[in-house]
Amino acid sequence: MGIQETLKALSDPVRRQILEHLKRGRMPAGQIAELFDISAPAVSRHLSVLKDAGLVRDYREGKFVFYELKASVLEETLLWMMNLKEADGEEALRNHVHPDGA
C-alpha cells in the first residue's frame, strides 16, 4: 500500500468517519452500514477502498464480516508527512539565519 492510496482513501469524509468509528474497536459490516444515511452497497464500496489502502482489515466470524482499524499504514503516512514538515522547517531556519542565501 502506498501513500497515494492512503491519501486517496482518506480524502472522502464518509471513509474518515468509518475510521473514527473503527478506532473504538472492531465492528461488523452491517453495524457500520447502519451508521450512515447511504446504501449498504455504498458503505461496502467505502470499506473496500479502505481495505485496498491497507487502512482496515476484515475477517469473518460465522456469518458476519468484521472490520478493524490497521494503524500501521497511518503511522507510515504520518511519518512521511512529518519528515516533509521537518525538511520545510530546516529550510525556513536556514533562510532565517542566512536570509541572503549565503
Image: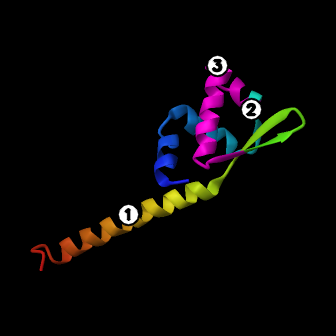
**Residue under numbered circle 1:** 84
Earlier along the polypeptide chain: callout 2 or callout 3? 2
Toward the left, the furthest residue is 100
* Mark drawn on residue 48: none
**Residue under numbered circle 3:** 39
Query: Per the image, is 16 magenta?
Result: no
> Residues under labels 2 and 3: Cα distance?
12 Å
Give 96 or 37, whichever is nearer the viewer: 37
Magenta span: predominant SS is helix
- Residue 83 point in image, percent of width and height: 42, 66
**Residue under numbered circle 2:** 29
Badge 3 crowding class, 10 Å Cα cut-off, few under 14, some 14 to 19, many 20 or more, is few
Image quadrant where residue 34 sits: top right
Q: Amino acid at mark 2?
A: Ala
Query: Residue visible at 60% across and 41% down?
Result: 50
Q: Give the left or right position of residue 52, taking residue 101 as reference.
A: right
> Residues under labels 1 and 3: Cα distance?
38 Å
- Residue 68 point in image, percent of width and height: 72, 45
Q: Amino acid at mark 1?
A: Leu
Badge 1 crowding class, 10 Å Cα cut-off, few under 14, some 14 to 19, many 20 or more, is few
